[in-house]
Image: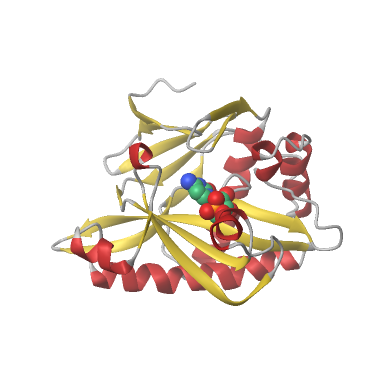
Amino acid sequence: MSRRRQIYEGKAKILYEGPEPGTIIQYFKDDATAFNAQKKGMISGKGVINNRVSEHIFTLLAGIGIPTHFIRRLNMREQLVKQVEIIPIEVVIRNVAAGSLSKRLGIEEGTPLPRTIIEYYYKDDALNDPMVADEHIACFGWATQEEMHDIADMAIRVNDFMSGLFAAINIRLVDFKLEFGRVWENDYSRVLLADEISPDGCRLWDMVTNEKLDKDRFRQDLGGEVEAYQEIARRLGLLPVEP
Ligand code: C5P
């Protein structure tokens, strides 16, 4: 583990003070939770894979001009990122009906959506991360309208890019969650893509068999979660995961 001062421990990651001011170290755990931590478990080696997958995707996104918090991977389980003020909104992008959308609206899982949907959830475990509208976000000052504009714009660009990235390896990007943070430069704030992108926060289905290769294997007790995460890393060309 790290020798540095711990700032925060979340469900899947620990944040430590970084070596320079304005930096943070993200440590990826093997712990898995679902349903707002009502279900707890472990996916052996998940932290190593998520660290590597997230590095890969954030690096590719930086290459198409998406500003991100990612600086560099440090080792098997840690990466150095910019310290940001996390915007307390989970941004969910959906291409195919699944999960809470299917449940809430009675739409059969697997139904392709005629257009991409972006949803916002207020990050608050005690409230079970309720879905909110732009109006709530503006009303309660969680993000400015300019920031929300940038977030929606980036979410669509990330979705377009990632849908293609996964389609090329025969995987359907059903839906996924993004988080954003702000950094201050003089008197101006800038929005950066933050957190991680990994099979923990994406629904990824094999295009041929529809097999689920993501955290739904854990949520739904399907088994084979380690193999599913490894399969994603393998198809992305990331195995063996380098130290
Ligand atoms: O559960 P739901 O269908 O709303 O999830 C949509 C997508 O967002 C899924 O890919 C899920 O993995 C991700 N998600 C997440 N963290 C949450 C809620 C959803 O990563 N707290």
Depth order, front residue of 62/101: 101
Q: Which residue lies furthest to the right in this view?
A: 209
Q: Provide residue 149's location: percent of width, then percent of height.
A: 33, 74
* Residue 147 in view of the camera: yes
User: Which residue is at a point 69% across and 60% down the rendered structure image?
Assistant: 109
Q: Residue furthest front?
A: 106
How is the protein colored in the picture?
secondary structure
* Residue 196 in view of the camera: no
Whether residue 126 is situated above or below residue 203 in the rendered picture? above
Image quadrant of residue 83? top left
Depth order, front residue of 241/158: 158
Whether residue 131 is situated above or below residue 160 in the rendered picture? above
The reply, left or right, for residue 58 in relation to residue 243 is left
Image quadrant of residue 106? bottom right
Whether residue 229 is situated above or below residue 192 in the rendered picture? above
Q: Residue furthest bottom?
A: 114
Q: Provide residue 231's location: percent of width, then percent of height.
A: 78, 46
Q: Provide residue 35's location: percent of width, then percent of height.
A: 53, 38
Q: How many marks?
A: 0
Depth order, front residue of 45/108: 108
The reply, left or right, for residue 168 in relation to residue 165 is right
Q: Which residue lies furthest to the left in this view?
A: 187
User: Which residue is at a point 34% across and 65% down the rendered structure image?
Assistant: 133
Looking at the rendered image, the quarter that the C terminus falls into is top right
The reply, left or right, for residue 69 in relation to residue 216 is left
User: Which residue is at a point 37% across and 38% down the rendered structure image?
Assistant: 125
